[in-house]
Amino acid sequence: QVQLVESGGGLVQAGGSLRLSCAASGRILSSYLMGWFRQAPGKEREFVAAITRRVYSTYYADSVKGRFTISRDNAKNTVFLEMNSLKPEDTAVYYCAGRPLWSDSYYRDDVYTYWGQGTQVTVSS
């Protein structure tokens, strides 16, 4: 069993930055495909970024490409999401997710096995 706990959310002005963390317990994250998703009020949950388990390839939604960076520290069993140049439309609850194996459908939330409880990110204009 894997438990994922996100932290780092908060209120920030447009143009600001935040760094989200996702700490795992129960299993070693190094073997997992990890992703970040977000859900804004009244909207469906959407893919933000993913990072592979071995070669550390990264994937991003077009809406965050060039502004967000996903990374992982396997020694600390933690995945990060560095968010820069934040916009009001980035306001959402951000979720960390993981699955033991690679999936070509890394952008779909239904392929992930484990989820954190979410952390709120609010960007004011």
Image: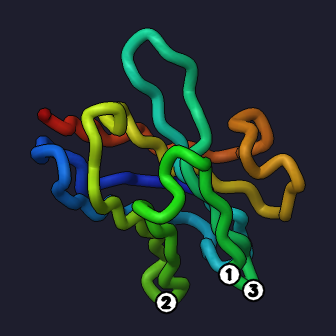
The quadrant of the picture occupied by the C terminus is top left
Decide which of 40, 77 is in the foreground and name it: 40
Quadrant location of residue 120? top left
Q: Which mark is residue 75?
A: 2
Residue 69: percent from left, percent from top: 46, 68
Q: Are marks 3 and 1 in contact (CB under 8 Å)?
A: yes
Decide which of 105, 2 is in the foreground and name it: 105
Crowdedness near tag 1: few (<14), some (14–19) or many (≥20) residues, C-alpha within 10 Å: some
Q: Is residue 113 above or below residue 45?
A: below
Q: Which mark is residue 72?
A: none
Residue underneath mark 3: 55
Would residue 23 be visible to someone looking at this image? no
Residue at image position (61%, 72%) is 29
Of label 2 and label 3, which has the lower sequence position? Answer: 3
Give the farthest residue toward the top.
42
Q: Tell me the SS state at disc 1.
A: loop
The amino acid type of the residue labelled 3 equals Val
Would residue 125 be visible to someone looking at this image? yes
Decide which of 88, 48 is in the foreground and name it: 88
The amino acid type of the residue labelled 2 equals Ala
Q: Nearer the viewer, mark 2 or mark 1?
A: 1
The amino acid type of the residue labelled 1 equals Tyr
